[in-house]
Amino acid sequence: MQSKRHPYHITISLALFVAAGLWGVYWIPQRALEAGGLSGGWGTIAQMIIPFLLLLPFSLWRKTKGLSFGLEYPLIGLLFGGGIACYANSFLLTDVVRALILFYITPVWTTIFEIIFYRQRPRTYRFISLTLALSGLWIVFGQGGNLPIPQNAGDWIALLGGIFIAAAAVRMDIKKTDEIYPILFSFFFYGGIVTLVQAFFLRDFLGSAPSIDAWISMLPWLFLLAVTFLIPTNIVILGAPSRIGAGLFSIIILFEIVVGTISAALLTEELFGWREGIGSAMIIMAGLSEIFFTSQSQQKTNS
């Protein structure tokens, strides 16, 4: 589906690079929360509920002004929120590397959904970008050349998370809404519901419930994390697919892996060798090439 190129196509794409990069250092506050007593899936639950509570007064204010409350995108909220919940909870049930690989083959599912719903064969440059991105992902995380075929519940949850994110991105691309807030609020509300439901079924893997003291001590940090990180980055992430396309979106978000790998090497004792360097470069090249070729293609279409 070729649509008119957004006037800020490149700016939004670069902003998504930044947002994805910030999620690459998300492990830092996550470890801080674990050190404070919010271990396992409890931190994920809190990080869906706190932003929702912060946004709730604004939704009530919107209602008094005759605007929508912000819950008119349940499918997008459930898909995107469900994807994030699956991604976070998969780490409780399987190896981190396997969860990352199975989740981040998202561009494959996005391309398949585009073929189904747009009824159009992807252009050649998409296959080039996909090859670069997935090869880079494989080089960074490849484990002895073994294919990451799902082998346990955690693997399947990670895979399902990627499928949900791809479906949400395509749905947002189809809707082409200019509104961001209703999608943002729907994400935290419906995503929070999915997170709580998953937590109920995975309660044996969540770890012991945090103490009251842990919740109280971490609450200010959770509010700070929501205001400075969770809400701003998700504004960019949730607003991107309808403006730059689901395919480009799904490739750029792989930049999280690049920043995560580099930041972990700089701030911890994790290694960053030739494999990580080459793989990271390929992922960056995939995103930049997709931006370039998409821009060129849409310029020709619009001219």
Image (spheres, grey):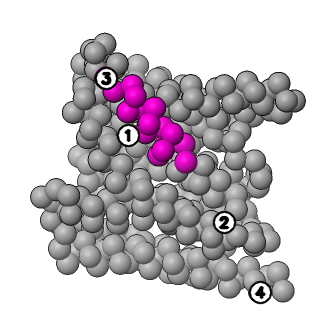
Q: Residue at x 42, y 61 (%)?
A: 21
**In terms of secondary structure, where does tag 4 sit?**
helix
**In terms of secondary structure, where does tag 2 sit?**
helix
User: Would you call the spot at circle 4 few (<14 residues within 10 Å), some (14-19), or many (20 or more)?
Assistant: few
The residue carrying mark 1 is 88
In this rendering, the answer to whether 300 lies above or below 208 is below
- Are circles 4 and 1 on residues that touch, CB within 8 Å? no
Q: From mark 1 to mark 2, how far is it between C-alphas?
A: 26 Å
Compare residues 71 and 217 and report the one nearer the observer.
217
- Are circles 3 and 4 on residues that touch, CB within 8 Å? no
Main secondary-structure element of the magenta-colored stretch: helix
Q: Kindly indicate the quadrant of the structure image that contains residue 73.
A: top right
Q: Is residue 85 visible?
A: no
Q: Earlier in the sequence, mark 1 or mark 2?
A: 1
Q: Which residues are magenta?
A: 217-232
Q: From mark 3 to mark 4, how far is it between C-alphas?
A: 56 Å
Q: From mark 3 to mark 1, how far is it between C-alphas?
A: 23 Å
Q: Kindly indicate the quadrant of the structure image that contains residue 295.
A: bottom right
Q: Residue at x 70, y 57 (%)?
A: 242
Q: Give the x, y percent position of residue 160.
A: 46, 44
Compare residues 273 and 264 and report the one nearer the observer.
264
Q: From mark 2 to mark 4, how far is it between C-alphas?
A: 16 Å
The residue carrying mark 2 is 244
Which circle marks residue 217 in the picture?
3
User: Would you call the spot at circle 2 few (<14 residues within 10 Å), some (14-19), or many (20 or more)?
Assistant: many
The amino acid on which the numbered mark 1 sits, given as a three-letter code, is Ala
The amino acid on which the numbered mark 2 sits, given as a three-letter code, is Ile
